[in-house]
Structure formats: structure tokens, C-alpha cells
Amino acid sequence: MEMVEEHQIFAGKQQRWRHTSSVLQCEMTFSIFIPPARSEAPPVLYWLSGLTCNDENFTTKAGAQRVAAELGVVLVMPDTSPRGDAVADDDGYDLGKGAGFYLNATREPWAAHYRMYDYLRDELPALIRSHFTVGERASIFGHSMGGHGALIMALKNPGRFCSVSAFAPIVNPAAVPWGEKAFSAYLGEDRTAWQAWDSCALMQAAGSEAVLPTLIDQGESDNFLTGQLMPERLAAVANAKNWPLELRMQPGYDHSYYFIATFVEDHLRFHAQHLFA
Amino acid sequence: MEMVEEHQIFAGKQQRWRHTSSVLQCEMTFSIFIPPARSEAPPVLYWLSGLTCNDENFTTKAGAQRVAAELGVVLVMPDTSPRGDAVADDDGYDLGKGAGFYLNATREPWAAHYRMYDYLRDELPALIRSHFTVGERASIFGHSMGGHGALIMALKNPGRFCSVSAFAPIVNPAAVPWGEKAFSAYLGEDRTAWQAWDSCALMQAAGSEAVLPTLIDQGESDNFLTGQLMPERLAAVANAKNWPLELRMQPGYDHSYYFIATFVEDHLRFHAQHLFA
């Protein structure tokens, strides 16, 4: 593993690392923020980005390091898909590179590399534990496609995360255009296989051991709210199951990083409350 | 004047505007942050960016809107040079487009469009006053080439700004490689003409009416510190004249926006102290 960039920010370290992923069969890059020392084994908060992003969007635009430094939380920002010339791609911004949807693909030409779920569940956390001084406790959050990713990671791995949150997540990919396009390509046309990667279906099927504090912020002026996001569908499942989901509709905010920057402090404090509980 | 983008952030508005500049003889774009209403005529804080930047670098990376919203300060982020196919350019990143050096060029092929000083002194503030509800009071800050720009704007226009600050400014362009290259091209080889655009020379020559609170942050791990920036030269002039300059050397910080993001809150509060005095 090779460090390709390092900057000091808010008395912590912002680093970029490159490594060969055995799961994804390609070179991958991730970013990490290491706060100034407050505890011997700081908890880790994973951020999953949205369509077209890489590890740098959140790193440069969200303004999260200020609060993470204060709280003593490590931030890990992975890429959104496998990368490199050998990796299958598509002309659309919503399929292929930059659009891995945090699942394990089963169909060609995607199955060889598109295994972001296994990468995020196993390989990356092991790398983080072996190269950095971090504690056992972890939480996860993300934006849009990455909000979907954070929710499915938490729902499919009971006990793994202390809390989960999302900005404008795709909560029901099995039934909206972005998800239908990606799932058809990555998983094939049998829609029953899609349910394993759909937050609404996963929360519906979840047992009590999977329950965890869940926060969602959604801008009311988000162009994708109707048609792609529809967080009310997840809120309805949560409501029926008494799931501790807080859905906050935010008037005037859109789908951009300006929205994320506005509320990222709330999310960091939400996670810290559970990471340090 | 046409608005090309608008986003809500921290309950304020982040907007991008395009207009035809009669001074620069080209289409120009600037960004503006309008805080949530706190006063009828909020003061304006101008930000001048560094080499290769446009109006969006500070807008997306500095995290300044959070504090500007709290303080009730309008932020104006201009571009760093004239733009468009008709505008002269150079292959170097440090001359031509993205590198206007905030001066009025006198040599061809630059003189026709490269008049950023007049644009920033006259045309842009008039545009801001006529299209937005702002007060009379203004301050100015910037980074690197934009730190040079902020300092010369303040030094050449006594009484115009309440305060000036800079991150890693080029304080002595007449005597460092970046400035020597740019000034040779824009102003010609007669170095006496350069003194009118050099902060060290301007501060040396300034009368008491030009004195204003001045703050500079400089990262000690900045690759350009020795050779291009050398803030100690301005500090020496300030010291000899009893100028209220605070120069803060910041261990571990480099020339990037991670450095700016870390200390931008200090700069905003410094300016607010004088804007609202």
C-alpha cells in the first residue's frame, strides 16, 4: 500500500492511499482523515459517495474534517467502483465506473471486478485495521448511491456498525430508474435477486438484531426526490417496524455538496453519540 | 447579468453569475454567497483566488459559508483572469488565463483584456451594489496570487477596505520568479513600473491613511514558502512602520485548500470584527 498524498488539516492528517485490491482485481485509491490524537483507538466512520464521484469529492467539499478532528473520529472515503483499463465500463454516468452501487455483480461483463460490497465489508476494513491505529467501533454514512450503500451495508451486517446515516439516499433501488438500470446490468433481470440489495426490502426483512440508529436528511428541492429517491418509502417500513429512523426533510436544499456541507456536522455528532456510547 | 447556478447552503444562497465586462472586454463569471438575512445591508468580503483557480475553488473547498452565514457577511468570489477564446493566453499555468495577477497589463498581447485591477476596483463592486442588497463596508482576502491581489487592492485604495488578510500571499512579486515572469510579460522589463503592484513596495510607500488591520497565515510546510512567498519580507516592512500586521506561521500546513479550510474561520471572524466595528 502506497501513500500518494498527505496534507495537514485541522491539526489532523488527510491522506490518499493506493493499493491492489484482491477482491476487485484492480488498483484502488481511498482517502482517510486521521484526527489529532484524542484516544488510543479512535472509531472509524466510513463515507460512501454517490454516482460519478471518487474518494475526493467528500474529502474536498464536505467540510467534515473540522468536526471529525474535534470529535476524534477517523473518516474513510473509498472510491465508488473498481477502476482501471481492464475494468468494464458503460457510457452512462449511472453504470460502470463511478457507479458500482456497492453490490457484488453476478453478470458479465461486470462480475469480474464489480464486487464493491465484498471490498467494503471485508478487504478495506482489514486494510484500515492493519495500517492504522483504529478501534473496533465503526459507523457508516453516504450520499445518494452512497446513501444506498451505507444503508445496505448496515442492514446486511447486524452488529457491525453503531449507527448509519444518509444524505438523499436511493432507498428503493429495485423500483426506481437508477437502480433498475444498474441492477439489470449487474444482477440480471430476475428481480427477486434484487431484493438482497434494496434497503426497503432489507429493512422489511430485518430481525431485531439488525436494528440501529438511522438518520436521513433529504433536501426538498432535490431534483431526484420524486422518481429516484423517495425516502418516504423507507420511512413507511421503519414506521411499521418501530425502527429508530429519523427522516428530516430540509426545505430549499438540493442534491449537491452544498446540502451535504450544511448538515454534515449533525451527522458526525449523531454518529459520535453512538460510536462513543 | 445572468444567474447560471443557485444552491442553498447554511440557510443562505450560493449563486454563480455571468456578465459582460466592459473593462475586461469579455464574458466573466463570479460566485457570491448571500447569508440568511441578519442586517438590511450586510458587508461584503471579497475573496481573490490563486494561480489556476476560478470562482469555484474557494466556493466549493474552503467551507467559508458556514461562518459567513453565522456572521451575516456576503462573500464575493471573482475569477482570476479574463476568459474566452479572444483572450491572450500562455502555456504556463502561471501566466495568462487563470493568472491575471490582479493588475492592469500595459504590454501586448495582454493589455487588451488583462485589467483585473480595474475590474475589481470599479466594475465588479458597482455590479454587486446594483444587483444585491449590500452595505458600504467591505474587506478583502485571498490566497497566494490572490493574497497578493488582496494586499495590493487594500494598499492602493486607502479607506476602501476595513481589513485585509491573506493565506500564503506572494508579498514581493517584483523579486520572486512567479512575479518576475508575470510582471515582465504584463508590464514590460522596466522594473520601476513593477513597484506599483508589489505589496512590500506599496506598504513601504504607504501613508498613515492607508493603514488597516492586516492578517497573514503561512504554512511552514508550504513548498513555495522559500523562493516565491517569503512573508517575512512584508513583516519586516510592517515592523519598521508599526503597521498592524499579524503574521502567523502555521507548522505542518502546506499551500492547499486544506490549509485554507483550517484557518478560514479565523479570517472571517477577523474581518467581521472590523466590518461590524
Image (cartoon, coloured by chain):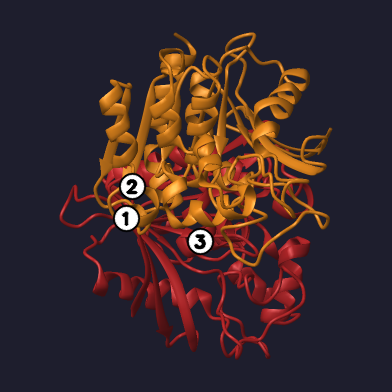
Chain colours: A red, B orange
Q: Chain of mark 2?
A: B
**Which residue is painted at 58% across and 90% down in the image?**
A112
**Which residue is painted at 58% across and 17% down in the image?**
B43
Label 1 packing within 10 angstroms: few (<14), some (14-19), many (20+): few
Q: CA distance from mark 2 to mark 3?
A: 31 Å
Give the number of the disc on residue A56. Answer: 3
Q: Residue A100: give x, y in percent of width and height.
A: 61, 73
For badge 1, the amino acid type reads Thr
Q: Which quadrant would the C terminus of chain B be assigned to in this image?
A: top left
Give the side of residue A206 with respect to residue A6, left or right: right
Q: CA distance from mark 1 to mark 3?
A: 29 Å
Marks 2, 3 in one chain: no
Are the two marked residues, 2 and 1, in contact with CB atoms closer than 8 angstroms? yes
Residue topped by disc 2: B230
Q: What element does badge 1 sit on?
A: helix
For badge 2, the amino acid type reads Met
Give the side of residue B14 with respect to residue B88, left or right: left
Residue topped by disc 1: B226
Q: Which residue is the extreme one toward the left? A: A40
Q: Which quadrant would the N terminus of chain B be assigned to in this image?
A: top right
